[in-house]
């Protein structure tokens, strides 16, 4: 036993905080309760981490999701027992589907207290499991930091994972904590022999390349793929949902598989071969009567060049090298800046594309109202783009908070549907407290527009009771007042040229701002 | 097979809606998504239920909790897949700990779609289990309504339960639905032979009677227990958390076991015998170093007169009859109406006690700021009192919504801590939409005061990083703006006489109102 491994008077909580910090974790998104007071104390005494309070657990895990996507490493979250973990679950789900690394520390009752049916007693591991790739309950103070390093190692492994470590209160307060060494560096799955040659042999006009994961965060890799596509007649697509894109002017554009089932099927219908790079065969968001679940045509030959555990950019480079294909960056023109007029979907897209500053982070939870923005911003100033991955609405405002904490010098522009905004509206307060330069554009159409489309898709014609569950008027939500209530300034705009002007001003100023765009 | 049992062209969703309505369920608290569109359609076409939209799932289940406590029957909730169910979990937990009846209908992917890793795929049964007493996944349209009746039967059984029925989308849209008959009436566990005699023999000054459940909702039973206590020298207490009290002037008062561990231990220290009526041996909220988990003194003789599955009022009547004890109602005086001055804990308690109208429903999530209100309102106009049971904050605003839907003619006064309010603040919008007469008094101390107490209890002295996680200033929350943003009028008051005046005016007017009480 080395001196470092010797039991100490340090309590379990402090050993975890110090070990996580030693492994590079320096931000904690927290919503603590009584069972986490020893962590609050350890974070306070050591001063090693920036602690960001969320007023609701979904803010905490959503912020951790946005942080991880931009920092490319996990923050730690601090959560409270099974109900708090449940509140955190939807954005753990989104992070998990994004393959974003996340480490959750969840306090539980002291071990001796768990057998009693106390008011807050519930199955914490059970609440963690549906939304975690890795779950463990710490057993004693001496091994607690090692557990935390295992959680961190799991989170950083390929593909990244959501790891949840449950911490009975006494494990935190007991002495005998031991510091633990950082986990080993993650290892990529190697390229399989012959995988590149097989891919090269499949390319042609009947072939679609589906690339995701780190490929989309590597503009050089996307340019190489576009070069390969141009040289062979193949088509390049990203899946509908992805962790992050680095894109914009001077970077090769890439289109996504559309969300609506019929458009998705149509987009993929021409292909008899598919090459997957850090991707899996695409699946419909939902099943519909008379429509398939898998989106590639029946009989399509599918080849995984490298899986989600692989190094996509290296695989792409090997394929380009074999083909002798040069990278290709086709510039996409910016749409003209919109003239004064109502805020329609195409107009708001043009306004955002023209107002986006270089280095911005776009957080996309615009759902139906933002459908034209993706295409319009292909030629916008270079930016990162992170969006909803798991379909659990309410990730946008928190992700914007986390992205700003990760990259404080980059302006964040959050494209936010109104219905979705209300799931985690509390995140605006944390943006104000942390002084985040986040400009949130609320797409205020006052309806769950996407659900009206889905209701039509099941053949129904909504009457008053259905509309009562799909419309958000009566009363209309006033996002300027909501923002003011949490210390965030804002204004409502009804003209698209005014929207562009206000957006430009807001991103140029520090601190958060809310623009309610009346659609 | 009777004609009623014959398969029909009715789809599964419609068979469930019609069968639930046939069994007396006529309110649906809904937060639907794509997989529930057939329910939205069935609710719309049949017009059998009042559908109340929540902007967040925690509002939906919290409203169902408040509704069930006041209506004494379940509403149905409509929820969306595993992440939506997770969002609903904290208030399912509170309802479960309250033994409030609840039936959740949760859409899942169509059965054939569940094997694919679609964006919203996650383990729905797994997400339900920690917060449900009963979980089932429907298997086909023909048995779907029978499953719903089983869920309703489970929810209404003694003690009441949280039942979650998972509904794959195709089970809802498939034809062949069969109506199902209402579940059998719930059965109370009978009094065990000799249980009353044993209780009678234990009574005396060293005996505490702990009564909960339906006893506290039956003023006659509490009066009989007070009579028994007075006749024998025993002490009557309610547990710390309970589903509902019917109390106030003309009804016998009852004190609760205090929340703080030291006060709880002190309150129960004198007793060598305990009689439990619809109650279990009391457990500390949390474990603390050097403190026991069980609150009754070691060696205390415990006798369950009747359990949580029994008929407490009948057991009390039998005990009173055996003893020949007459009911006793000691009137507790109202505190004098407060004079102008700052809003302290005792002053706000006096203001609320004096302003409370007859027949009001008090919803208590005031946490630390409302500690004096319980005692002050013992002599207030007769009212019902429902409070947080499971310790998962964020039940107050939704419960007030649900209580008002259950009892539209009774004014609701919601006592709401500021930190807790932010978990489900979205419920104000539903209050406005439904025109609920709910007056919410926000105890704006701008801190998680209770956590400061808990941090002190683990021996820590908070520094800036700890205070950053416990204080809610920077920026201060402005609840008047937040309410306005959701269509609810309100005002901030800093003087307690003004508070009383505004509260009286607000409860006398229809519709919701928010009073931010600066403490």
Image (spheres, coloured by chain):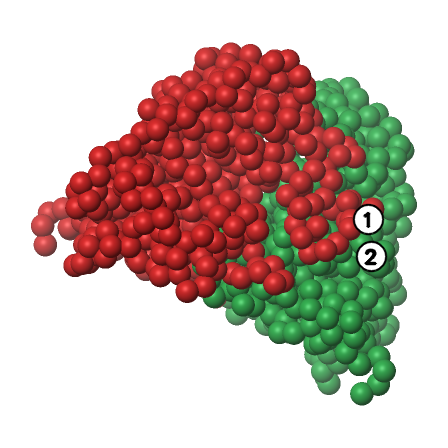
Chain colours: A green, B red
The numbered mark at residue A45 is: 2
Q: Secondary structure at mark 2?
A: helix
Q: Residue at x 63, y 66 (%)?
A: A170
Which quarter of the figure has residue A265? Answer: bottom right
Would you say A86 lies left or right of B221 here? right
Q: Residue at x 84, y 30 (%)?
A: A506
Q: Nearer the viewer, residue B258 or A211?
A: B258
Establish if A460 lies above or below B34.
above
Q: Are marks 2 and 1 on the same chain?
A: no
Q: Residue at x 79, y 75 (%)?
A: A8
Q: Classify the position of the C terminus of chain B by image quarter.
A: top right
Residue lying at the far bottom in this picture: please name it. A1
Establish if B338 lies above or below B210.
above
Density class for disc 2 (Cα within 10 Å; few <14, some 14-19, many ≥20) is some
Residue indicated by mark 1: B463
Q: Secondary structure at mark 1?
A: loop
Can residue A280 be seen by looking at this rendering? Answer: no
Q: Nearer the viewer, residue B264 or B13?
A: B264
Q: Classify the position of the N terminus of chain B by image quarter.
A: bottom left
């Amino acid at each position: 036993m080395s001196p470092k491994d010797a039991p100490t008077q340090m309590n379990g909580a402090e050993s975890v905080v110090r070990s996580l910090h030693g492994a590079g974790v320096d931000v904690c998104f927290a919503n603590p309760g009584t069972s986490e007071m020893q962590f609050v104390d350890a974070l306070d005494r050591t001063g090693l981490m920036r602690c960001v309070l969320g007023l609701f657990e979904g803010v905490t895990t959503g912020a951790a999701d946005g942080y991880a996507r931009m920092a490319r490493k996990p923050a730690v979250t601090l959560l409270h027992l099974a109900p708090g973990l449940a509140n955190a679950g939807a954005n753990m789900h989104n992070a998990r589907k994004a393959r974003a690394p996340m480490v959750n520390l969840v306090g539980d009752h002291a071990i001796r207290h768990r057998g009693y049916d106390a008011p807050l007693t519930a199955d914490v591991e059970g609440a963690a499991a549906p939304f975690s790739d890795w779950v463990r309950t710490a057993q004693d103070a001496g091994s607690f930091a090692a557990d935390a390093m295992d959680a961190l190692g799991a989170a950083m492994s390929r593909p990244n994972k959501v790891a949840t470590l449950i911490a009975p209160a006494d494990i935190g307060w007991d002495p005998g904590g031991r510091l633990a060494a950082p986990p080993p560096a993650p290892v990529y799955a190697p390229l399989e022999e012959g995988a590149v040659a097989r891919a090269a042999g499949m390319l042609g006009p009947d072939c679609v390349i589906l690339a995701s994961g780190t490929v989309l965060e590597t503009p050089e890799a996307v340019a190489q793929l576009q070069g390969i596509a141009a040289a062979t007649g193949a088509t390049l697509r990203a899946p509908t949902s992805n962790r992050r894109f680095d894109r914009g002017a001077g970077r090769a554009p890439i289109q996504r598989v559309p969300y609506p089932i019929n458009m998705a099927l149509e987009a993929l219908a021409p292909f008899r071969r598919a090459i997957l790079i850090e991707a899996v065969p695409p699946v419909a968001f939902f099943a519909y009567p008379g429509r398939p679940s898998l989106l590639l045509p029946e009989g399509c030959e599918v080849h995984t060049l490298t899986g989600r555990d692989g190094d996509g950019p290296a695989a792409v480079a090997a394929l380009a090298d074999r083909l002798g294909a040069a990278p290709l960056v086709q510039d996409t023109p910016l749409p003209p800046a919109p003239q004064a007029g109502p805020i329609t979907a195409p107009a708001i897209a043009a306004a955002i594309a023209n107002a986006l500053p270089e280095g911005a982070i776009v957080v996309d939870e615009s759902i139906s109202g933002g459908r034209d923005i993706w295409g319009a911003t292909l030629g916008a100033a270079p930016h990162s783009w992170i969006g909803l991955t798991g379909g659990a609405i309410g990730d946008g405002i928190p992700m914007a908070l986390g992205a700003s904490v990760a990259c404080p010098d980059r302006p964040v522009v959050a494209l936010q549907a109104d219905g979705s905004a209300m799931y985690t509206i509390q995140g605006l307060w944390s943006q104000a407290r942390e002084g985040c330069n986040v400009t949130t554009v609320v797409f205020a159409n006052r309806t769950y527009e996407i659900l009206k489309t889905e209701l039509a898709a099941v053949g129904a014609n909504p009457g008053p009771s259905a509309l009562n569950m799909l419309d958000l008027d009566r009363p209309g939500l006033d996002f300027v007042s909501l923002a003011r209530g949490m210390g965030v300034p804002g204004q409502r705009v009804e003209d698209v040229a005014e929207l562009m002007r206000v957006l430009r001003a807001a991103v140029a100023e520090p601190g958060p701002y809310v623009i309610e765009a009346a659609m």
